[in-house]
Amino acid sequence: YNAIAKGDICFNDISYTYYGSDKPVVKHLSLDIKQGEKLALLGRTGCGKSTLLQLLTRSWDPQQGSISIDGVPLPTWSEPALRNAITVVSQRVDLFNGSLRENLILAKPDATDEQFVEVLAKVGLSSLLDDNGLDTWLGDGGRHISGGERRRIGIARALLHDAPILLLDEPTEGLDRRTEQQILTLLLEFAKDKTVLFITHRLVGLGSMDQICLMDEGEIIEYGQHQQL
Ligand code: ATP
Ligand code: MG
């Protein structure tokens, strides 16, 4: 299946146990996220939140149950189509030794320099262009990149990739409050029409979510709107 995804997500009674473990980390979990809907996922450390995202991106397949996008089971999706359907922004943004352009281009191989410059302005990174434009060197021996700048590069990549599904795995972990607020505002504005699954330990941004789920030991134990919880 090689279509352009719309962004309906369905986890149907899935269970997952890591190889070599005897304890499932996800247990009979069902969750529906409709196209354009925003869902926050909260829960203690180790309860299985990131694992759930990895199952959706097919890093692993559940031993039981099925996951589908737009009603089509994940194993039926071609790998490139699935990659185009989903963007992940996590607390880790991997930069490699290379130019600024090289660090962005994987997100959108056909992007023009103008598009890179535009997106850098949007995420507040225009100053990175001061040294040597898009040829500014990042990584070893290159320009020093702060934690906040690194995160903004991750967001620039997400904006370029422009997929219908946005998975946020604690995207502002370790940032100061002001930067956190700025980055979340930027991400949520960008994601207005997208399907969002937002993993967080904090309260910032929950007001923009349609649903809030509480996960514990591999299960969804509570489900509701911001005001109810
Ligand atoms: P946090 O809030 O700390 O990020 P989480 O809810 O995202 O936690 P997961 O990363 O999904 O939790 O991990 C769930 C459980 O699975 C943990 O007990 C963890 O040790 C285990 N686990 C995670 N990744 C692997 C792996 N690759 N191999 C084996 N066990 C793993
Ligand atoms: Mg996690």
Image (tube, helix red, strand yellow):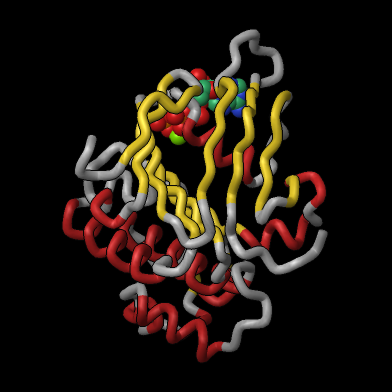
x 36%, y 46%: residue = 211
Q: Looking at this rendering, what residue extends furthest in the bottom direction?
A: 114
Decide which of 225, 99 is in the foreground and name it: 225
Say if 45 sits above or below 58 in the image: above
- Counting labels gives 0
Q: Which corner quadrant of the image does residue 221 belong to?
A: top left
- Look at the image and tell me in which quarter the N terminus lies: bottom right
Q: Is residue 205 left or right of residue 84?
A: left
For the question of whether residue 136 can be seen, the reply is: yes
Q: Judge whether 191 appears above or below 47 on screen.
A: below
Tell me where residue 92 appears, x and y as whole percent. 46, 47
Q: Nearer the viewer, residue 178 or 42?
A: 42
Q: Quadrant of the C terminus?
A: top left
Q: Which residue ends up furthest to the left in the rendered image?
A: 178
Q: Is residue 18 above or below residue 110?
A: above
The quarter of the picture where residue 52 lies is top right
Residue 95 appears in the rendering = no
Q: Residue 29 location, x and y as percent?
A: 56, 28
- In this view, the residue in front, 208 or 16, is 208
**Residue ID at (64%, 8%):** 22
